[in-house]
Every structure is written in C-alpha cells, then in structure tokens.
Amino acid sequence: MEEDMKLKSTPIQRNEYDVAIELTNLYFSYRTDSPEVEEIQQVYARFYAVVCGMDVKFRNGIPVNKIEELLPESLKEK
C-alpha cells in the first residue's frame, strides 16, 4: 500500500550567537596570521553587540537599507 508523505519544511533560524560566530569567522578568514585568543574574544563580543543592537532596532521598524549606519566606526574601517 502506497502512502503519500508530505513534509513541511521549517526555515533555518539562527540566533544572535550563530550570526556573531559567522561574522567572526568571516573577519578572521582573510588573515594569514594566527590571532590570539583575547583578540578573537574581543572581535566576537563586538559582533555580538552589533547583532543584538541591530535586532532591537529592526524590531522597532528601522529599514534594512540603514544597516551600514548602524555599524560602529571601528568595524567600518576594517
């Protein structure tokens, strides 16, 4: 007897930690030297703060094209 199975796909949801880790990996992927643990922690903390801040602002209705304005100057320089 043949049965039809229908699967409902669930979109992948990433939280702030996941996004901060991805951004940190991307940040260090262009470097040829091995960063110190403290530097990795600092960069991750900055990205995490940016992600959390952007999440709050987008929930309050800030349009997506304003993303660059939300980034701190230290990240724009890199």
Image: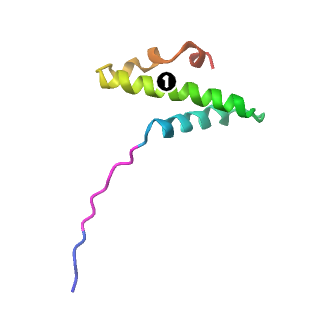
User: Which residue sits at x=58%, y=19%?
Assistant: 75
User: Which residue sits at x=50%, y=38%?
Assistant: 17
Answer with left or right where residue 23 lies relative to residue 40: left
Can you say which quadrant of the picture contains the N terminus?
Answer: bottom left
Give the vertical position of 8 relative to 30 (above or below): below
What color scheme is it?
rainbow
Can you say which quadrant of the picture contains the C terminus?
Answer: top right
Asked whether 10 falls inside the magenta stretch, the response is yes
Residue that badge 1 annotates: 50
Give the vertical position of 69 relative to 41 (above or below): above
Residue 26: quarter of image:
top right
Answer with left or right where residue 53 lies relative to residue 43: left
Circle 1: residue type: Val
From the top left corner, tell me how far across and down residue 22 is, in percent.
55, 38
From the top left corner, tell me how far across and down residue 7 is, in percent.
28, 63
Give the vertical position of 38 relative to 14 (above or below): above
* Farthest right residue in view: 33
Query: For the magenta stretch, what is the residue range?
Result: 6-13
Asked whether 31 falls inside the magenta stretch, the response is no
> Of helix, strand and loop, which one carries label 1?
helix
